[in-house]
Amino acid sequence: MRRWKHTERTYSAEEDRPLGGYLVTMAAFGVYTAGWATVVKMRGRPLPDRPLPWDVALTAVATFRLSRLLSKGSVTSPLRAPFTTFQGPQGPAELHEEARSEDVKDTVGELVTCPFCMSVWVASTLTAGQLLWPRATRTAMGALTALAGADALQLTYSALMAKTTSA
């Protein structure tokens, strides 16, 4: 334990870094993915030799959209509220929130406000879903991909309108 405290102290350079919380999060992710892998194996689902390029692209776009929705979306803020503090808006229908600095809430707050961190969990979940329930998962990923496309079109339209009306 003393060695760990020394490692935390020398690593953090006087910053408050929740390394213990990160370890717990990594362990939780390991348990989570092992759980999915066990269910896939128990169901006897064959693993593909390699992912199809279409599935990789669909998973990437769906992961992007769902990760942003979960970590930044206004409508999903009640899910993050126990671990975060509202700071203000951050773009269309998105919020800027800070992790609460209360032990484990700090680490969970960082996870749930970071779309990059969230994407690891989302991509793993979608991948497991493709193995267990391919049709339903691909349908949901198609909807998320369509939503990402619609978002891009909305932002493009708004930018074009702003450009043409300010001239």
Image: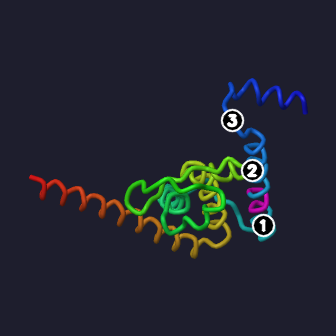
Amino acid type at image mark 1: Val
Range covered by the magenta-colored residues: 33-37
Q: In which quarter of the image is residue 40?
A: bottom right
Q: Quadrant of residue 136?
A: bottom right
Mark before the other along the chain sequence, 1 or 3 = 3
State the residue position of label 3: 16
State the residue position of label 2: 104
x, y percentage for residue 167?
Answer: 9, 52
Task: Name the dominant secondary structure of the magenta segment.
Answer: helix
x, y percentage for residue 81?
Answer: 61, 62
Amino acid type at image mark 3: Asp
Q: Residues within 10 Å of mark 2 (few under 14, many from 20)?
A: some
Mark before the other along the chain sequence, 2 or 1 = 1
Would residue 61 be counted in the magenta stretch? no
State the residue position of label 1: 39
Amino acid type at image mark 2: Val
Residue 56 at least partly seen: no
Q: Which of 124 and 112 is in front in this view?
A: 112
Q: How far apart are marks 1 and 3 (CA)?
A: 38 Å
